[in-house]
Amino acid sequence: MSLADQYRRTGRLEGACLCGAVRIAVDGAHVAAVGVCHCSMCQRSSGLVWGAFEAAADAVTISGAVTRYASTPFSERAFCPVCGSNLWLRNTDRDDADYELMPALFPAARAFPLISEIYTDRAPAYVPLSGDHRRATRAEYEANNLHLEGDMP
């Protein structure tokens, strides 16, 4: 059993972007825990640190206009075209790929624990994350995910 499996849940979560133009409902399988990434791509996208929780594609319903950006040849980042709120990161190589949703959009996610942190050797000095969670450097993470090169020069 993976660490994320320990936090797998089913149920309903409702969230919205800053202006409310985009609403997201999760009704089904999701991981009630957050993973963060410190690669430079995620830092540039979020302005600080990228954190997300996973939800099954068939559990996610989106209403409102969304702008998608192909951040890699196999993934997209989405945001609200009105207020600019980050919404998700998702692989685009499969229609059934999970969503990696921004926890701050969902009030219930405030209670989710931090369970993983990647690209720890790229984290800015002003973002130390404490606690007992799984950590991986760029080399450690990319060794297990050969299709990735998440750090930009």
Image (spheres, rainbow, N blue to C red):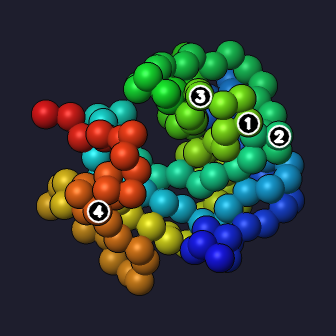
Q: CA distance from mark 4 to mark 2?
A: 31 Å
Report which residue position mark 1 lands on: 96
Measure the alpha-carbon separation of dots 3 and 4. Answer: 24 Å
User: Circle 3 is placed at which residue position?
Assistant: 93
Q: CA distance from mark 4 to mark 1?
A: 27 Å
Pointer 4 with pointer 2, Cβ within 8 A? no
Mark 3 against mark 2, which lies toward the viewer? 3
**Would residue 123 appear left or right of 103 to someone viewing this image?**
left
Q: Position of residue 47 (x, y in %)?
A: 31, 39
Residue at numbered disc 4:
140
Q: Are marks 1 and 2 in contact (CB under 8 Å)?
A: yes
Q: Residues within 10 Å of mark 3 (few under 14, many from 20)?
A: few
The residue under label 2 is 58
Q: In this image, 27 relative to 115: left or right?
A: right
Q: From mark 3 to mark 2, how far is it between C-alphas?
A: 16 Å
Amino acid on which the number 3 mark rests in the picture: Asp
Q: Earlier in the sequence, mark 3 or mark 4?
A: 3
Packing grade of label 2 (10 A; few <14, some 14-19, many >=20) is some
Rendered location of residue 51, percent (x, y) = 46, 52
Residue at image point 67% right, 55% down: 107
What kind of residue is marked 4? Answer: Glu
Query: What residue is shown at x 24% (from left), y 41% (from top)?
Result: 151
Q: Earlier in the sequence, mark 4 or mark 2?
A: 2
Looking at the image, residue 99 lies above or below residue 73: below
Instruction: Categorize mark 1 by other alpha carbons within 10 Å: few (<14), some (14-19), many (20+).
Output: few
